[in-house]
Amino acid sequence: MFSHTSVLIDEVESVLSTISEPQYIIDATLGLAWHTAMMLTHVGESGRVLWFDRDADNLRDARVNLEEKWLSKKFIPIHASFDTMEDVLREQWIKEVDFILYDLGVSSAHYDDWVRGFSVRFDGPLDMRFDRMTWQTAEDLVMTLSERELIQIFMRYADEKKSLFIARAIVDVRKTQKIDTTFKLLEIIEKSSFDKKSWIRVFQALRIAVNDEFGHIERSIAQAMRCLKVGGKIAVITFHSLEDRLVKNIFSEYTQDVIDDFTGQTRIPAAFRKYTKKPIEPTALEVDNNPRSRSAKMRVLEKIHSIQN
């Protein structure tokens, strides 16, 4: 269950090691808890790592893994989206944190669980929810959205060039049958697009839409910037270009000085600076050992001033 190793774990630890005696750390995307296990070794006896996950199964499995490592007293599990960060910190009476990590995307546990519908390796229900207590599934989207709405999702979240043909085929097929499994959707995509990678992009787009991933990222990072103490760092690992572009644009807002239009002078200094000029990428050795890491990029910012309005 825990054979998977999180990507860029050595690089994350290298960033974390630059923070002297961190007291509070947030793992915003728990997954299988390998990043968390590493981070727990960096906090002192009174320190804590808060970890968020919308998936109750991930929280359960990660707790077992961490308790086996005798680390249970140092973590605080949160079954919620990371966009509740500020509310959770208030509930825990925590004013600010030293380090926040986001490892975006889908965990290996999701891909390996046939009933979750994230992978076409299995013929499973067309679900794709991170939190199965929510109501909207991928099946709901493909069965109810209009052709135009489906096209918008496929283009916005995956840059799928065959969106029109795929969306039209979905709308046509659902007139006579339910599209409720991964294999049914895969067959429709393959017959309507000559691009062998279209199914990857369509599944990605539906997953992002079902879980409102970009909305959660935007809301959460804005909170993270406020929650970090001066001298603290935020690291975000992405796995595809749209995700990375979103994070890059958000980060750029916090690394720009506010210039007075009249005088041309700095009115409000940037609250953050880049930790590295370019995103941190996996080594060739890591890619060989873990092909999933090939597309990973990690952007890191350091907070240098309090955020001013």
Image: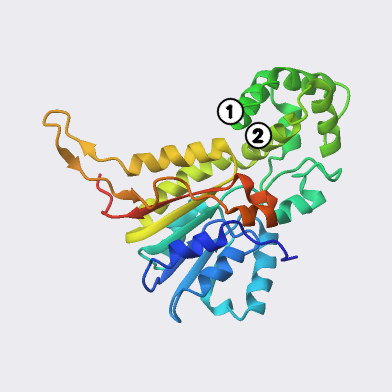
Q: Nearer the viewer, residue 14 or 201?
A: 14
Callout 1–callout 2 Cβ contact below 8 Å: yes
Q: Which residue is under mark 1?
A: 156
Work out whether residue 207 can be spotted: yes
Residue at 71% over, 54% down: 108
Work out whether residue 132 can be spotted: no
Hey, what amino acid is under mark 1? Answer: Arg
Number of marks in the image?
2
Q: Nearer the viewer, residue 294 or 255?
A: 294
Q: Nearer the viewer, residue 156 or 299?
A: 299
Give the mark nearer the N terminus: 1 vs 2: 1
Residue 213 screen position, x and y as percent: 57, 42
Q: Which residue is under mark 2?
A: 205
Q: Is residue 143 left or right of residue 30?
A: right
> Where, quadrant-wise, is the N terminus in this rendering?
bottom right
Residue 245 screen position, x and y as percent: 49, 36
Mark 2 surroundings: few (<14), some (14-19) or many (≥20) residues within 10 A: many
Residue 251 higher or lower than 109, as above or below: above
Hey, what amino acid is under mark 2? Answer: Ala
Residue 123 screen position, x and y as percent: 86, 43
Disc 2 secondary structure class: helix
